[in-house]
Amino acid sequence: MHTLVTILHVLACFVLILVVLLQAGKGANMGAAFGGSSQTVFGSSGAGTFLGKLTATVAIIFMLTSLILTYTASHRGSSLVERSKIPITQQAPPAASPDAAKQPILPPATPEKK
């Protein structure tokens, strides 16, 4: 389920980017007044309504998949968090005796020469 939602989310990302890039800017009709061709690729109503509705639909799908992925990630937990809850069974090494601190540290013995 998580993989399916992730794939749908990535596809919605790419489609949303493409649909936004296909839309004409607000000043695009100015070029048609000076000899440019009209945009009749998307029908007589133009690209505004079709691409606008498609953008809204894909944006809703993108937001829903984002919310679903966020919800599942927050309830799934992190492996790091799970590992921190495991009790430690190893015991610490025994502490040095208080007398060990008072004893002087001697240099290593040198071998006798014969």
Image (cartoon, rainbow, N blue to C red):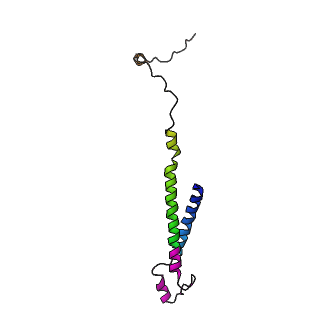
Count every numbered label the image shows and give the total.
Answer: 0
Residue placed furthest toward the top: 114
Up-down relation of residue 30 to residue 72 (above or below): below
- Taking depth in this image into account, of 24 and 81 the one nearest to the observer is 81
Residue beneath the point at 49% across and 54% down: 71
Q: Image quarter for residue 42? A: bottom right
Residue bounds of the magenta highlight: 24-53
- Taking depth in this image into account, of 3 and 114 the one nearest to the observer is 3
Q: Is residue 32 magenta?
A: yes
Up-down relation of residue 57 to residue 71 (above or below): below
27 displayed left or right of 15: left
Q: Is residue 36 magenta?
A: yes
Residue 24, percent from left and from top: 50, 78
Residue 55, percent from left and from top: 51, 72
Residue 13, percent from left and from top: 54, 65
Residue 36, percent from left and from top: 52, 87
Q: Image quarter for residue 39? A: bottom right
Q: Quadrant of the N terminus?
A: bottom right
Residue beneath the point at 49% across and 38% down: 85
Q: Quadrant of the C terminus?
A: top right
Residue beneath the point at 48% across and 84% down: 29
- Taking depth in this image into account, of 112 and 109 the one nearest to the observer is 109
